[in-house]
Image (cartoon, grey):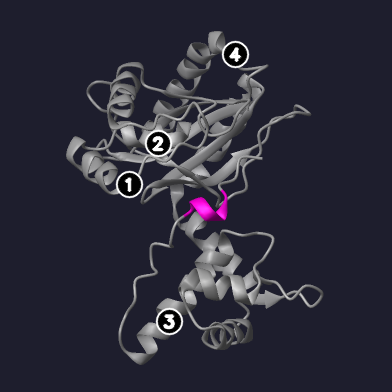
Amino acid sequence: MNEVKRRTAGRPSGSSKVSGGHSQSLVRGLTLLEYLSLSPRGLALSELAEMAELAPSTTHRLLQALQSQGFVSQENEQGLWRIDVKTFRIGNSFLEARDFVATSRPYLRRLTRDSGETANLGIRDGTAAVFLAQHESPQMMRMITRLGSRAPLHASGVGKALLAWMADDERNQLLERHELTPVTANTLATPRALEQEMALIRREGFACDREEHAIGLHCVAACIHNEHGHPLAAISVSGPVARIPDTRLAELGQLVRSTAAEVTAQLGGQLPASW
């Protein structure tokens, strides 16, 4: 429901070309894996070749090598390529190695219990927020985000919460290189509007996504900080506007903010002085 389309995801961060036989093949293979990870339905050989700017023969050779090691598989009926179980295991080891994911899970469950809505945990990856954990709402109509999916920082609750607490120079440099593409008619798509929003988030301690990433969906998010007070991750609650109207955003904002502060303390983090 709340997934970022492949065409808005941009080139994978590791897709820069590297000269020299084996290094170039490795980078190209990893680039193919990144594109496949962004498309759960799978991709045809021709699609992958076009996206990676490789010849179909080169793409097929790399996919066969990845397949032989269990990283990708091909669906016989349609011929689509997908990531396979070994890729999942390697990705899952990242979650296991980062204590904040495991530490946050009971807090996500509690957020869902107290709010009645889906709770998420996300981190920043370049100019996108990536969702690592989720506890779904028991409601029939609920927000669901595929783990590993991405959302633009400027057009999501988790993303804006992370942006707001970045150092000013780091945030400015990031936004200078990043086009503020509107996702919906409500997306904040100018530097001035976004900077005003950042100041509001820092004052209130939580960020609101008012149908900025998906029409009909509201989200409230707050930042988890590391031992230096820098953004580590963000947690959020999201649900349909019918159950999260504007009048409920402040209430949920305080709930998410206090929960994020608890997770920060549990991890030995430090809240900013202005929190």
Q: Which residue is drawn at 57% across and 62% down?
A: 37
Q: How far apart are marks 3 and 1 (CA)?
A: 27 Å
Q: Mark 1 points at which residue?
A: 178
Q: In which quarter of the image is the C terminus?
A: top left
73 or 18, nearer to the observer: 18
Q: Is 226 placed left or right of 91 in the picture?
A: left
Under tag 3, what secondary structure? helix
Q: Main secondary structure of the magenta part?
A: helix
Under tag 2, what secondary structure? helix
Q: Mark 3 points at which residue?
A: 26
Q: Nearer the viewer, mark 3 or mark 1?
A: 1
Asked if residue 199 is positioned above or below residue 80 in the image, the reply reads above
Q: Distance between the residues labelled 4 and 1?
A: 30 Å
N-term mark: 2 or 1:
2
N-term mark: 2 or 3:
3
Q: Which mark is residue 245?
A: 4
Amino acid found under the numbered disc labelled 4: Pro
Q: Residue at x 32, y 18 (%)?
A: 200
Q: Nearer the viewer, mark 4 or mark 1?
A: 1
N-term mark: 4 or 1:
1
Q: Distance between the residues labelled 4 and 3?
A: 48 Å
Which residue is the extreme one toward the left?
169
Mark 4, residues whose alpha carbon is within 10 Å: few (<14), some, or many (≥20)?
few
Mark 1, residues whose alpha carbon is within 10 Å: few (<14), some, or many (≥20)?
some
12 or 220, nearer to the observer: 12
Q: Mark 2 points at which residue?
A: 154
